Image (cartoon, helix red, strand yellow):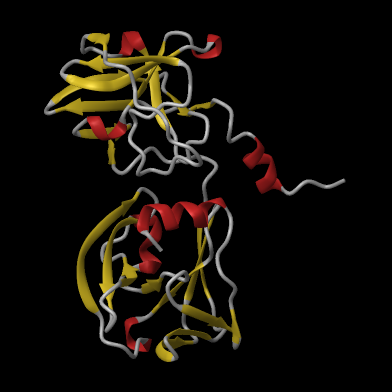
Amino acid sequence: MSTRVADLFGRGADELRHEPIERRVRAYAGTDAVVDSTRAILVWEPRRVVPSFAVPAEDISAELSSAPPADGGVAGILHPGIPFSVHTAMGEPLTVGDREGAGFRLADQDLAGYVELDFAAFDSWLEEDEEIAGHPRDPFHRVDVRLTARPVRIEAGRETLAETTRARLVFETGLPTRFYVPREDIRAELRPSELRTYCPYKGEASYWSFDAGDDLAWSYEEPLPDMLPLKGLVSFWDERVEVFLDGERRGETTGIFADVLREEFGI
């Protein structure tokens, strides 16, 4: 009997997972490189959506000391908004230099000697000589952008917000397909929002609202080099609008990542 690949990944979500990477990784506290390692691995604690870096303790130049017990009591999927201090693996919280709780010594024989690190606890990170932001990239995560001439229409409350035959479809691992529309094909007035988020795969997102006042859409005004085709295009929360493709209304997004979006963004 054939098995869906996504289901194989899902079955391992409750386990502690790791993957070696052949990259020099550095973390800075101010101008000091407190982590410098060519032996880094990626670690996913049980139910964590995105990975963390872990390095051998000897590749950390700052003093390591015990930290107060970690937080607990979080059920379900741990999305990026859940702080690092919530641990679902066995281990010991550590203070790294003056960064309390920024490390976690994993109690796993396969990861003996490694310290998992809180990405947000440090001021900057480098992979080789390029700065990265947001969180470490998952090597099993893809983002594919495809231009389509298929008709796409976006509605809210029976009002057409956008209609195009020049959309770009974004197919991203584990997430619903998103529809990016040229500004010229948007009929409603875009109102800028103060909200900003950062995607390690696409860059910083700016958000937009319409008459309702909610943040219904976003764009990447200066996307990362891999995502230049998305520059200035606008996408919409399918969860807050109605999306029609080839004249057919798309169904509601479902699955664990839809639940994560609803929890983190309230959609």
Residue 35 in the image, given as x and y percentages of width and height = 27, 20
Residue 174 in the image, given as x and y percentages of width and height = 55, 52
Q: Say whether residue 135 is left or right of residue 189.
A: right
**Where, by quadrant of the figure, is residue 194 drawn?**
bottom left
Q: Give the farthest residue toward the left.
A: 31
Between 10 and 220, the residue placed more toward the observer is: 10
- Residue at 24% in and 16% down: 95
Q: Which quadrant of the figure contains the C terminus? A: bottom left
Between 231 and 186, the residue placed more toward the observer is: 186
Residue 71 in the image, given as x and y percentages of width and height = 34, 26
Q: Say whether residue 212 is left or right of residue 158.
A: left
Above or below for 99 versus 207:
above
Between 257 and 145, the residue placed more toward the observer is: 257
Residue 192 in the image, given as x and y percentages of width and height = 20, 73
- Residue at 36% in and 64% down: 228
Q: Give the farthest residue toward the right.
A: 1
**Where, by quadrant of the figure, is residue 55 drawn?**
top left
**Where, by quadrant of the figure, is residue 217 drawn?**
bottom left
Q: Give the farthest residue toward the front.
A: 73
Above or below for 168 versus 29:
below
Above or below for 263 versus 134:
below
- Residue at 50% in and 54% down: 259
Total numbered labels placed on residues in the image: 0
